[in-house]
Image (tube, grey):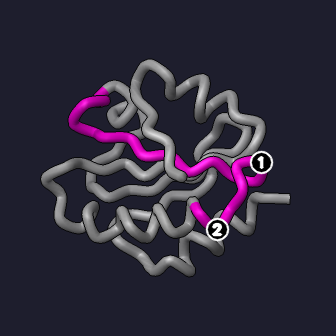
Amino acid sequence: MTKEVNDTNFEQEVLKSTVPVLVDFWAEWCGPCRMLGPIIEEISNEFSDDKVKICKLNVDNNQVTASKYSIMAIPTVLLFKNGQPVEQLVGVRSKKDYINIINKYIS
């Protein structure tokens, strides 16, 4: 299941995570974001939380974090490992693309 993250808990949930974290930066009004949502949800059901954490961050409500990572277009998906962004996918991609980047970073 995806976890909602925000400016307040981003450091704890994402940057300090012991497993890689996939973060979907999205907004309510964004059509492509709504298309991506079910794909991210499916992916979260396919991986256990001890392998990878799947999170969503609403850019309208959490502009500090969105700005920190220079999110200029949404949806943007960042994969973090050891507190650092290591992969970025902008726009809606295939489910396989997201799974491939997750598999590169999980052990």
Q: Residue furthest right?
A: 107
Could you tell me which secondary element the residue under label 2 belongs to? Answer: helix
**Vertical order, 70 against 106 (above or below):** above
- 52 inside magenta stretch: yes
Foreground residue, 38 or 77?
A: 38
Could you tell me which secondary element the residue under label 1 belongs to? Answer: loop
Residue 94: assigned label: none
Q: Amino acid at mark 1?
A: Asp
Q: Residue furthest top?
A: 8
Q: Which residue is mark 2?
A: 46
x 28%, y 56%: residue: 74
x 43%, y 52%: residue: 24
Viewport quadrant of the C terminus: bottom right
Q: Which residue is mark 1?
A: 50
- 75 inside magenta stretch: no
18 relative position to 91: left or right: right
Q: Amino acid at mark 2?
A: Glu
Residue segment shown in magenta = 45-63
Q: Pointers 2 and 1 in contact (CB under 8 A)?
A: no
**Vertical order, 32 against 65 (above or below):** below
x 44%, y 19%: residue: 8
